[in-house]
Amino acid sequence: MNKNILKNKKRVVFYLSTEDKELLNGQCELLQIRASFFIRNSVLEKLGKPIFNVKKQDLDTKGYISELIRIGVNLNQISKKLNSGVKFMLADQQTVLNDIKNINNHILEIKSKL
């Protein structure tokens, strides 16, 4: 960390009960910020100093992104098989159609939650 920034700052230590610490950690996890950042800005807000705006994110966003990555992998596997020139058996065609249907359902589910 920059030494000039540390020169102007002083360390403050305080204690919280177990319940209060859990509440603080839960709030920070929800906002996806560090506890020190949350406490500093809360104190500054009470003192009337300007605070930073924290961008709130839905925690499920990471799950949606990983699900979209899985969908992309499935699509790549389907397109690779289709472009390989290998003849499909009827069972393979049905499997591909079922995969496409499942992918479509996943995309609709993710879209409805965003």
Image (tube, rainbow, N blue to C red):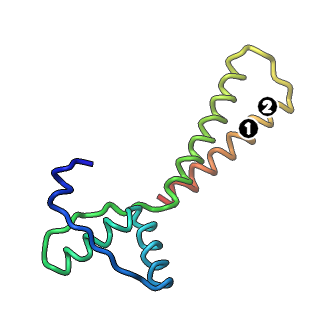
Image quadrant in which you'd find residue 74? top right
Distance, label 2 to label 1, CA atoms, is 6 Å
Residue 31 image point, x, y percent: 39, 66
Q: Amino acid at mark 1?
A: Leu
Q: Is residue 86 left or right of residue 46?
A: right
Judging by the rendered image, the residue that carries numbered circle 1 is 97
Residue 110 image point, x, y percent: 55, 54
SS class, disc 1: helix
Image quadrant in which you'd find residue 51? bottom left
Residue 53 image point, x, y percent: 25, 64
Front in this rendered view, residue 12 or 87: 12
Within 10 angstroms of label 2, few (less than 14), some, or many (20 or more) residues? few
Front in this rendered view, residue 81 or 30: 30
Judging by the rendered image, the residue that carries numbered circle 2 is 93
Q: Are marks 2 and 1 in contact (CB under 8 Å)?
A: yes
Residue 62 image point, x, y percent: 52, 53
Q: Is residue 53 left or right of residue 62?
A: left
Residue drawn 30% across and 63% down?
54
Residue drawn 46% across and 85% down?
17
Residue drawn 52% across and 59% down?
60
Residue drawn 44% across and 68% down?
30
Q: Is residue 73 above or below residue 1?
A: above
